[in-house]
Image: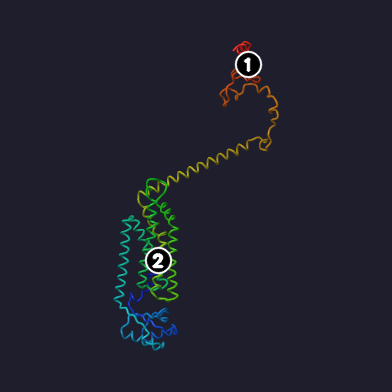
């Protein structure tokens, strides 16, 4: 919104290559800004843009509106006389308004053709909804880049248009990488009920996020170097600076749009389809069932803990205080009392896993089991054998 308002209110500052005009470059490092402006205004030219130039001229650069031949000569003579320089050292480049309009028309045609080809390619390679999402991301990059130029007052030149087309290709490359991962994660998604399309797309973003950030940082390093060198050595207003500046702004906005614009728009378009709406309902029902089961388990555990606390409250005071009854009469050295020899439930055959005794059912044995003695006949028989 800030970029759109800046474009509507301030607009773009086009160079003479688009709107036509004249550029005067001359070496006068000892002159001041006010002296150069006075020299140009004395020639009857208003609205001139005066900039410090470095490199080959190491002086000044003056941009004016379209001038006639006599007006151009008048400006050159005024600069030479006011600043005390040789008229032959002044370099003048004149661009007619018709040529500038042709450049603007060609740049717009190239941009439109680029967008159409990209939409067609994505529609064939992926699907038309991915193409629409990528197109929205590209428009976002255009608005952001041009909005920064409008806010900062940077001049738009043919080098700016070249850089703008370059960043659109870079942003598209990053978007295609993310979309390819989204397509991989959403393959066969309708056959289950575990993940919605938005969740699968979000997973694809997480899987490619580090790659996108690393790629952007590595690409911005040389662009930043070019921008610093162009400003420090060549001064403002050179084509290298204009190209590096739009690349720097466009790469940042392109990385942002691939993550925060293209994929969310794609997920919103896909979630509107009936099959993905049904998938979202199934996933919601499955998630609700899982939550209900967890609540039931938690409730059962809470009830069990409550019963344990209630049972502890009903225990005798001796057990609550930790005192244990005296079991000295049940030690191994003492014989069991008489009433222990009676029939009990634990000695009934088949009860609690205790095997049946060989005596009379239900009757406890009064003493230890003894082996029967062999009779004499038996021993004789054994001896004979």
Count how many numbered circles sit on residues in the image.
Answer: 2
The answer to whether the residue labelled 2 contacts the one labelled 1, judged by CB atoms less than 8 Å apart, is no
Q: Residue at x 32, y 56 (%)?
A: 125
**What is the crowding at mark 1: few (fewer than 14 residues within 10 Å), some, or many (at least 20)?**
few
* Mark sitting on residue 372: 1
Q: Closer to the N terminus: mark 2 or mark 1?
A: 2
Q: CA distance from mark 2 to mark 1?
A: 107 Å
Q: Quadrant of residue 126?
A: bottom left
Residue 83 in percent (x, y) is at: 41, 87
Q: Position of residue 328 (x, y in %)?
A: 70, 30
**Which image quadrant is residue 115 in?**
bottom left
- Using the image, determine if residue 102 lies above or below residue 138: below
Horizontal side of 71 relative to 283 (left or right) equals left
Q: Residue furthest top?
A: 377
Residue linked to disc 2: 250
Mark 2 surroundings within 10 Å by alpha-carbon count, few (fewer than 14), some (14 through 19), many (20 or more): many
The residue lying toward the viewer, choosing from 294 and 146, is: 146
Q: Residue 278, how many percent across, how many down? A: 37, 47
């Amino acid at each position: 919104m800030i970029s759109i308002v800046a474009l509507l209110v301030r607009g773009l500052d086009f160079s003479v290559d688009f709107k036509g005009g004249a550029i005067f470059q001359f070496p006068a490092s000892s002159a001041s800004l006010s002296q150069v402006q006075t020299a140009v205004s004395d020639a009857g030219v208003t609205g001139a843009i005066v900039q410090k130039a470095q490199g080959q001229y190491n002086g000044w650069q003056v941009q004016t509106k379209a001038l006639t031949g006599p007006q151009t000569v008048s400006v050159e003579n005024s600069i030479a006389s006011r600043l005390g320089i040789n008229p032959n050292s002044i370099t003048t480049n004149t661009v007619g308004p018709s040529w500038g309009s042709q450049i603007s028309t060609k740049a717009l045609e190239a941009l439109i053709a680029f967008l159409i080809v990209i939409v067609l390619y994505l529609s064939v390679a992926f699907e038309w909804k991915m193409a629409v999402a990528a197109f929205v991301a590209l428009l976002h990059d255009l608005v952001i880049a041009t909005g920064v130029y409008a806010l900062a007052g940077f001049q738009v030149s043919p080098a700016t248009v070249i850089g703008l087309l370059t960043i659109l290709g870079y942003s598209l490359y990053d978007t295609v990488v993310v979309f390819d991962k989204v397509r991989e994660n959403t393959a066969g998604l309708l056959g289950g009920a575990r993940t919605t399309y938005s969740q699968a797309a979000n997973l694809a973003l997480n899987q490619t996020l580090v790659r996108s950030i690393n790629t952007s940082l590595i690409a911005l390093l040389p662009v930043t170097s070019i921008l610093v060198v162009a400003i420090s050595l060549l001064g403002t207003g050179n084509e290298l600076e204009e190209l590096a500046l739009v690349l720097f702004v466009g790469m940042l906005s392109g990385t942002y749009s691939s993550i925060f614009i293209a994929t969310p728009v794609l997920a919103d378009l896909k979630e509107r389809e009936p099959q993905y709406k049904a998938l979202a309902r199934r996933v919601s029902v499955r998630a609700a069932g899982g939550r209900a089961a967890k609540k039931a388990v938690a409730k059962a555990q809470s009830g069990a803990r409550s019963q344990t606390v209630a049972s502890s409250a009903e225990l005798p005071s001796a057990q609550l205080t930790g005192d244990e009854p005296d079991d000295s009469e049940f030690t191994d050295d003492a014989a069991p009392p008489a009433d222990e020899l009676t029939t009990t439930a634990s000695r009934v055959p088949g009860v609690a896993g205790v095997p049946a005794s060989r005596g009379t059912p239900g009757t406890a044995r009064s003493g230890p089991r003894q082996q029967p003695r062999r009779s004499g006949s038996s021993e004789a028989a054994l001896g004979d054998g």
